[in-house]
Image (cartoon, grey):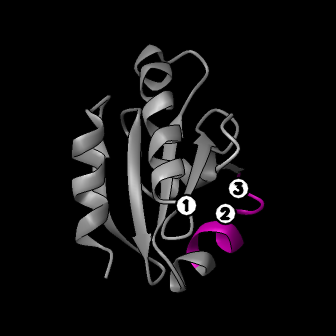
């Protein structure tokens, strides 16, 4: 996993995502080991984490290991990226999308 991307799970989701999103936007990449599109998106997510370091916190959540958090946000297909701000979901991207699609969504929630 990229150095700027933090792994989250059911145990630390509240602190690392919900609480952290009070001070800066937090992206959660919902993925699974068996999901090919998830692996295709991973380098893009790592690039975004690098580009937005200090402005946006980027995390990954394995849906097979953290089913409670995935269920809580009705994750039906992966990869899904959720953007949290102020403890709420403010953006959602589903599928292996181009980097520009992700940065455009993030830019809406900055500043």
The stretch drawn in magenta includes residue 15: yes
Q: CA distance from mark 2 to mark 1?
A: 20 Å
Quick one: 16 or 69, which is closer to the camera?
16
Q: Are marks 2 and 1 in contact (CB under 8 Å)?
A: no
Magenta-colored segment: predominant secondary structure: helix
Examine the rendered structure and indicate whether residue 81 appears above or below residue 65: below
- Mark closer to the chain start, 2 or 1: 2
Per the image, the residue denoted by label 1 is 53
Q: CA distance from mark 3 to mark 2?
A: 5 Å
Which quarter of the figure has residue 32? top right
What residue is drawn where x is 66% and y is 38%?
2
Assign the C terminus to one quadrant of the image.
bottom left
What label does residue 13 carry, if any? 2
Per the image, the residue denoted by label 3 is 10
Which quarter of the figure has residue 105? bottom left
Q: Nearer the viewer, mark 1 or mark 3?
A: 1
- Helix, strand or loop at label 2? It is helix
- Mark closer to the chain start, 1 or 3: 3
Magenta residues span 9-18
Assign the N terminus to one quadrant of the image.
top right
Instruction: State the image coordinates of residue 82 (x, y, percent, origin top left).
Output: 40, 55
Q: Are marks 3 and 2 in contact (CB under 8 Å)?
A: yes
């Amino acid at each position: 996993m990229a150095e700027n991307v933090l792994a989250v799970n059911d145990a630390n989701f509240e602190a690392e995502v919900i609480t952290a999103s009070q001070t800066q936007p937090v992206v959660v990449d919902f993925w699974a080991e068996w999901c090919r599109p998830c692996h295709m998106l991973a380098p893009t997510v790592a690039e975004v984490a690098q580009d937005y370091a200090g402005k946006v916190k980027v995390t990954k959540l394995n849906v097979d290991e953290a089913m409670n958090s995935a269920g809580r946000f009705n994750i039906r297909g992966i990869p899904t990226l959720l953007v949290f701000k102020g403890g709420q979901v403010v953006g959602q991207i589903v599928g292996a999308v181009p980097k520009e699609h992700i940065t455009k969504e993030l830019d809406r929630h900055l500043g």
